[in-house]
Image (tube, grey):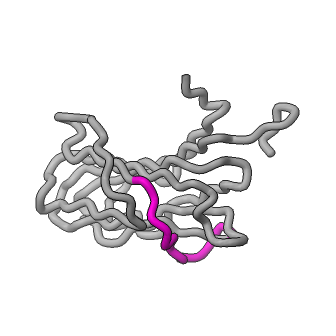
Amino acid sequence: MLNPEINPIQLAHEPAAADAIADTAAWCDLSKAKGVLITVLHYRGGDTDLVLHVHEGAAASGTTAITAAFPIWYASDALTDPSLVRQADAASFTIDTGVYTGSQVVQFFIDASILSAGCRYVQLGTSGGHASSIASVTYELVGTRYQNNEAL
């Protein structure tokens, strides 16, 4: 069973115009977790691809993209078929709005071990997107470590 006390969920960016997400999602601290499942919900309003990537940092700032490949899952028409299909590992993903015209779900799993030395924070970054498309972002920590009922 998934438990929000063990796998905390963080709203990284409220639903907004997809082109406004850019690099404004919240940062997620992985110092007390094995990794994070990043979920992007996207509803296509206009035909401008949304490119997703993940930043890393020693502090909660910057735009240094993770260069290591990570697991990606994708539901291209999530309202019709919510099945997430494993994609090839990569360091970014493009929602092709010319091909997929409904609602999409994209998930990345970022294992803390792939971050560069000294980095503990991650942030979803985007480019592109259309002003009439809507996107939102959540982070779900995985493998949170506890001692005496407090996250380490």
Residue 131 screen position, x and y as percent: 26, 64
Dominant secondary-structure state across the stretch colored magenta = loop
Quarter of the image holding residue 117? bottom right
- Residue 15 can be seen, yes or no: no
Left or right of 51 on screen, residue 119: right
**Whole-percent x, y for residue 52 in the image:** 37, 64
Q: Which is more toward the observer, 22 or 66?
A: 66
Q: Residue furthest right?
A: 148
**Residue 26's x, y, as percent?**
56, 59
Residue at screen point 32% across, 67% down: 51
Quadrant of image for the N terminus: top right
| In the image, residue 4 above or below residue 61 | above
Asked if residue 72 can be seen in this view, the reply is yes
Q: Give yes or no for residue 64 being in the magenta stretch.
A: yes
Task: Out of 41 and 32, give the one closest to the viewer.
Answer: 32
Q: Residue at x 30, y 48 (%)?
A: 74
**Which region of the structure is painted magenta?**
58-71
How many numbered discs, if any? 0
- In which image quadrant can residue 46 be found? bottom left
> Among all residues in the image, which is located at the extreme top?
1
Quarter assignment of residue 28: bottom right
**Where is residue 5 drawn, in percent x and y?**
66, 31
Residue lying at 68% horizontally and 63% vertically, measured from the top left:
120
Q: Observer-nearest residue: 111 or 98?
A: 111
- Image side of residue 9 versus residue 101, left or right: right
User: Residue at position x 62%, y 38% from top?
Assistant: 8
Left-right relation of 16 to 24: left
Looking at the picture, does residue 21 appear above or below residue 31?
below
